[in-house]
Image (spheres, helix red, strand yellow):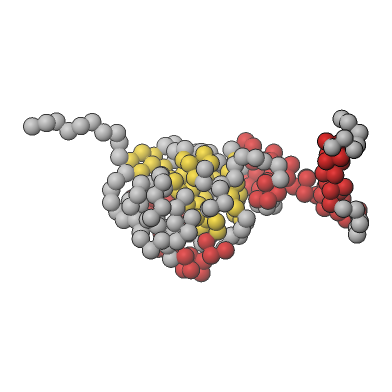
Amino acid sequence: MNSPLPSPAKYMIGPEPPALDPATVETLQQCETTMLGHILYWGALDPGIRANQGFGPRIAGRALTVQIPGPCSVMLHHAIGLAAPGDILVIDRLGDQRHACLGDGVAAAAMRQGIAAAIIDGPCTDSVELAELGFPVWCRGVSPMTTRMANLGGRAHVPVSVGGTAVLPGDAILADIDGVYVMQPEDAADVSRIALTRGQIVADRRRARGNDPLPLGQLSGASHMVATAMGDGPRD
């Protein structure tokens, strides 16, 4: 009789990441994702991951990362019990786009645990019920076909890939109706502070200009760049 082939552990849970600094979360919650989009070329999940039913309140919190394969949601159910209040589920579906791992039942359990939202690189189900429940979900659409207790395996508190972006356990997440941004905790405070400062400067300039009739290209500096490149203006 042949001996069983060696296999890696079916389930794995990494160490719990440290909590985010509450001051960082508070500052981040004052930002919009579009404010970060003006200053960062990285950290944004691709636009295919959208707020379910257009319900995308601004949420900031710590990433609780989960990987689950195909039709199996065993680790997701278990990982909900690992959450601290305010955590955001970040679920790597390992390429599966057919099976919905989260509907109103799982969302209700997540809310009881204090989880603030979920981000899924795949579909959800019960989309209307999720919005009515008040549980924000960013995902790739809706599917009626759900995951099951297939006991295939899974991982939590590990690095994942969601929306073309690497997400580490404990990363800072900012999500709203326009999308989702992911940052390492040590960057989140600086980035959010810079975004708020820039936003205030722009607002002050707009107020100072009032009904300024200048064309946008002159206001932004674009017209100067075009004129210089075409030889019609001073060279840098």
Q: Position of residue 49 (x, y in %)?
A: 53, 53
Above/below status of 75 relative to 128: above
Above/below status of 16 relative to 132: above
* Image quadrant occupied by the N terminus: top left
Report the number of discs: 0
* Image quadrant occupied by the C terminus: top right
Q: Position of residue 200 (x, y in %)?
A: 80, 49
Q: Nearer the viewer, residue 141 or 29?
A: 141
Report the residue at 86% width, 48% height from top.
219
Report the residue at 45% width, 48% height from top.
91
Report the residue at 17% width, 33% height from top.
4
Q: Position of residue 120 (x, y in %)?
A: 47, 52
Q: Nearer the viewer, residue 225 or 82?
A: 225
In screen coordinates, is 24 left or right of 206? left
In screen coordinates, is 220 left or right of 156? right
Residue 177 location, quadrant: bottom right
Above/below status of 19 relative to 138: above
Above/below status of 138 relative to 4: below
Q: Position of residue 34 (x, y in %)?
A: 68, 51
Q: Is residue 85 visible?
A: no
Residue 227 location, quadrant: top right
Q: Is residue 231 visible?
A: yes
Q: Nearer the viewer, residue 67 or 222?
A: 222
Report the residue at 29% width, 53% height from top.
149
